[in-house]
């Protein structure tokens, strides 16, 4: 049982009770010892007030444990801000108040330790790649891994726990329960499990998938109040509304870094890319459209010598933050998002300005920008 679903499972582990009793789950944001209240922030952002009485019982359970018999009794004074909590009582929907009979705590320290353990697990026992084939009858997935030497791995997902990234988030905690049937070729897929000796097969315990795209555009207008940017999509030449949220990585490449990435994309041009606008096709001798290195699972960094997994992500995180107020009409940007049913509207995971040199070096197909070698789809393993 994983941390993100553990408290949900515990919420149904209590003995049957009247329908009025409900469980709320969230992070402890404040504690009022004198007023005997705790504030919880739910995963959907809702704020709950948990009221306490002398009869309220407090339990602490380790992350990864789902049996309440393994919980230990604690005192109200042991609860701390940052802890993960499940409060059970008669929820008053109008005021979001819960007079709690029982509170189950996972401490912030325990969660941090579990987080470190999970990260290590995904690094040593995990694989990531692009789905190239699906065998529904045997629940097998074939992926091609990222990196300079791609490998084909067959994943036995017959006993796996499936999750899929939310349409507007690449946070591990926001991933939704999923099934094998939601997988599609071209998906980015992460799997955790036991590998065979040569690493060509993996018996999966967890499978995490998502469908992503990276787009280039020029700014038409900015609505700061709505946190949206209207673009012209350089691949389709059609309007695109980009929604920005708190999780969006907003960055501006400095000129030196943009030029370096452009040279990395097109190393044969020793002098760097020509000074042309993103809408003008490069000249002869540039990398042909459809060159290797593309696709949703090809890695986060550009193709070409020196590119490595996570390389571009690390570069961007060091770049200056971008404010929507800085954007001007005609600015070139690159946006990464989930693929959704409406191609005219996306929620950005990453929104990067200052990319004119890179786009000038990018290959073209029928005069349209081909970003096959630039990817910002998904980074690491679990975040909580």
Image (cartoon, grey):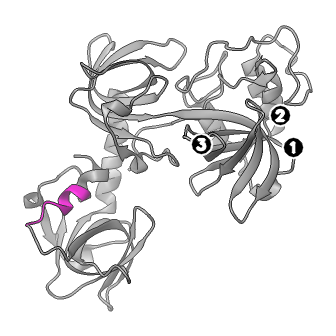
Instruction: Measuring from the top left, give residue 190's x and y in whole percent.
Output: 40, 30
Residue 180 within the segment the image draws in magenta = no
Q: CA distance from mark 1 to mark 3?
A: 24 Å
Relative horizontal placement of residue 83, taking residue 203 as reference (left or right)? right
Q: Which residue is mark 3?
A: 342
Relative horizontal placement of residue 368, taking residue 314 as reference (left or right)? right
Residue drawn where x is 32% and y is 35% of the image: 121
- 45 in relation to 126, above or below: below
Residue drawn where x is 66% and y is 43% of the image: 344
The reply to whether callout 3 and callout 2 are in contact (CB within 8 Å) is: no
Instruction: Measuring from the top left, give residue 317's x and y in whole percent.
Output: 63, 43
Relative horizontal placement of residue 283, taking residue 307 as reference (left or right)? right
Instruction: Measuring from the top left, give residue 107's x and y in whole percent.
Output: 29, 63
Q: CA distance from mark 2 to mark 1?
A: 11 Å
Relative horizontal placement of residue 220, taking residue 142 as reference (left or right)? right
- 299 in relation to 271, above or below: below
Q: Which residue is mark 2?
A: 356
Q: CA distance from mark 3 to mark 2?
A: 27 Å
SS assignment at label 3: loop
Local packing at callout 2 (Cα closer than 10 Å; few below 14, some 14-19, many 20+) is many
Front tag of 2 and 1: 1
Front tag of 1 and 3: 3
Instruction: Measuring from the top left, give residue 212's x and y in whole percent.
Output: 54, 34
Q: In the figure, residue 177 lies in which quadrant?
A: top left
- 339 in relation to 271, above or below: below
Q: Nearer the viewer, residue 199 or 369?
A: 369
The reply to whether callout 2 and callout 1 are in contact (CB within 8 Å) is: no
Which mark, residue 250?
A: none
Residue interval drawn in magenta: 8-15
Residue drawn where x is 78% and y is 56% of the image: 222
Q: Which residue is mark 1?
A: 330
């Amino acid at each position: 049982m994983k941390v993100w679903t553990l408290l949900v499972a515990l919420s149904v582990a209590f003995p049957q009770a009247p329908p009025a009793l409900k469980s709320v789950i969230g992070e402890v944001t404040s504690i009022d010892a004198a007023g005997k209240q705790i504030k919880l922030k739910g995963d959907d952002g809702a704020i709950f007030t948990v009221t306490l009485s002398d009869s309220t019982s407090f339990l602490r359970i380790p992350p990864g444990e789902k049996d309440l018999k393994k919980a230990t009794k604690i005192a109200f004074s042991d609860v701390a801000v940052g802890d993960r909590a499940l409060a059970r009582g008669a929820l008053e929907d109008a005021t979001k108040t819960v007079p709690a009979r029982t509170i189950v705590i996972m401490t912030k320290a325990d969660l941090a330790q579990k987080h470190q353990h999970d990260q290590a697990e995904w690094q040593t026992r995990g694989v990531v790649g692009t789905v190239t084939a699906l065998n529904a009858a045997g629940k097998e997935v074939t992926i091609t891994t990222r990196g300079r030497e791609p490998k084909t791995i067959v994943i036995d997902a017959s006993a796996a726990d499936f999750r899929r990234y939310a349409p507007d988030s690449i946070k591990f905690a926001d991933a939704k329960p999923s099934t094998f049937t939601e997988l599609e070729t071209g998906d980015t897929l992460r799997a955790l499990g036991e590998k065979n000796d040569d690493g060509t097969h993996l018996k999966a315990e967890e499978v995490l998938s998502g469908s992503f795209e990276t787009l280039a555009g020029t700014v038409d207008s900015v609505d700061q109040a709505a946190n949206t940017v209207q673009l012209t999509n350089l691949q389709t030449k059609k309007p695109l509304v980009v929604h920005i949220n708190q999780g969006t990585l907003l960055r501006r490449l400095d000129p030196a870094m943009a030029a370096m990435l452009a040279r990395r994309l097109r190393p044969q041009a020793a002098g760097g890319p020509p000074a042309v606008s993103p809408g003008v096709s490069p000249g002869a001798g540039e990398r042909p459209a459809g060159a290797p290195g593309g696709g949703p699972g090809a890695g986060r960094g550009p193709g070409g010598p020196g590119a490595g997994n996570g390389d571009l992500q690390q570069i961007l995180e060091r770049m200056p933050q971008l404010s929507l107020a800085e954007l001007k009409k005609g600015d070139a940007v690159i946006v990464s998002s989930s693929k959704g049913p409406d191609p005219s509207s996306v929620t950005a995971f990453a929104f990067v300005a200052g990319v004119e040199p890179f786009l000038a070096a990018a290959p073209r197909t029928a005069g349209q920008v081909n970003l096959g070698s630039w990817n910002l789809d998904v980074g690491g393993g679990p975040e909580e």
